[in-house]
Image (cartoon, helix red, strand yellow):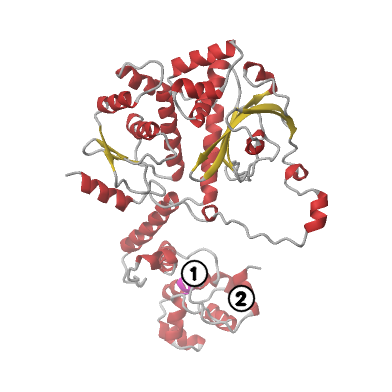
Amino acid sequence: MTTSSWNRTRQPETETVPEGEDAISLGRRLRHLRKSRRMTLEELGAVVGTAPSQLSLMENGKREPRLGMLQSLAKALEVSVDQLLGAEPPSRRAALEIALERAQRGPLYESLGLPKVRTSARLPMEALEALVGLQAELERRLNEQVATPEEARRANAELRGIMRRQNNYFPDIEAEAQKVLASVGHTRGPLSQHLIADIAAHLGFTLHHVGDLPHSTRSVTDLKNRRIYLTQSQRTDHDPRSVLLQALGHYVLQHKTPENYREFLRQRVATNYFAAALLLPEKATVEFLQAAKAAKEIAVEDIRDSFAVSYETAAHRFTNLATEHLGIPTHFQKTHQSGIIYKAYENDGVTFPQDHTGAIEGQPSCKKWTSRVVFDVPDRFSAYSQYTDTPSGTYWCTARTERAAAGEFSLSVGVPYAHVKWFRGRDTPIRGESRCPEESCCKLPPSSLAQEWSGFAWPSARAHSHLLAAMPPGAFPGVDETEVYSFLQTHSG
């Protein structure tokens, strides 16, 4: 028995149902049957013993008839009660009227502040079609542009699957990066600010460092006047070269305004890849890695130092090229000091924690893994290496920590045991064991502590409100478009 039918049989005295969807459907069906029998409200009211005004309220879905009245109406209209309460609208027009009435009673229509349209017989069919269609399209666009955390996690998991299938290597982006580097004659070594300015000029852009860049952005590109605005401030977690190269990447890769969060995410990953392919050119980086492999001395910090990039950028670039050019499967993990995974990639069979959507980001990393143990290592200058036995095999990982505005993070790169012979740090004596996802591994407290404190501790959790809220709306989530447009208007003169 449905809730609505429970209300009808168990609560017969309930008459007014201001927002009941069944009441709307029943009302339209009642009107359709009355008019098909060429009866006026007065005539039907006289037969069933109620005022025409009460019948009008029923037909408009503002009052639900009692069970006795339903039976009288069904008899007067020569149908059964079941037919009167049928699920399907009696006609296309009735279906549209129901859809419009429901929409106008919903929170979305209320938020628009528009006057309500009376769904009378005088309202043309074309107007009904247009109003219902506009409502449906508005809802569709809002649903696409406002992603819930679950939708965002699904998009991220889907993108990671694509990256895994391609071994995190994208030849089309590599080719575009190579064209850009060839245009300024750069082949190897660190990419200087001067060369990056030459790249921007070659692509037809001028660079402008300003002190009033919109707070929600890292850069703003003026496609009308071919300008790229960057901040003057040096206080940032991001390499200013990468920020500029990512801005140019949107242009080179011919990105259009994203229509949904999935497309926005893919564009962001593509521009990050493009920037890394410029900072660490494929040919030069592969030659460097092949020489290191031959010497059995692969080390992420050497990549970092040779190309003057951050450790994170070097680690990411290693995952781009390691499987494609060196035949080495690998994984990467960026973990906050709280233990929460912020970024992750794998094509080597390692088992990361994940939720039911397949998302890894936001999940706690095992306390026994290198990515967690490294936070407790006194020597922060040297890379920390460790073997870890897991249910999916033994992995060797190397990690470092870096501090950012959001706190301290570990950056960990790992490979299966069979491939550790190519890496510096393989001689580490440190070994751990992870049984995750078994709760007994690290999720449950030791039994002695649990016996002592269970029921006597009440911590106040640090709420991560971003995990509960919807993604910021707009084509570019989190960006204040009014602020950006005002900024461009100010600087376009």
Magenta residues, dominant SS class? helix
The quarter of the rendered structure image containing the N terminus is bottom right
Residue 425, quarter of the rendered image: top right
Dot label at residue 280: none
* Residue in the foreground of this view, choosing between 376 and 120: 376
In the image, residue 469 lies at what x, y percent? 50, 56
Q: Residue at x 71, y 37 (%)?
A: 368
User: Which of 117 and 397 lies nearest the eye of the viewer?
Assistant: 397
Name the kind of residue labelled 2 in the image. Asn
141 left or right of 67? left
Closest to the camera, between mark 2 and mark 1, is 2
Residue denoted by label 2: 7
Instruction: Return the x and y of residue 63 as percentages of the image width and height.
Output: 49, 79
Tell me the kind of residue under disc 1. Answer: Ser
Residue 417 visible to the viewer = yes
State the count of labels. 2
The residue that appears at 55% across and 83% down in the rendered structure is: 69
- The magenta stretch is 24-30
Return the disc, 2 or 1, that comes first in the chain's sequence.
Answer: 2
Q: Of helix, strand and loop, which one carries label 2?
A: helix
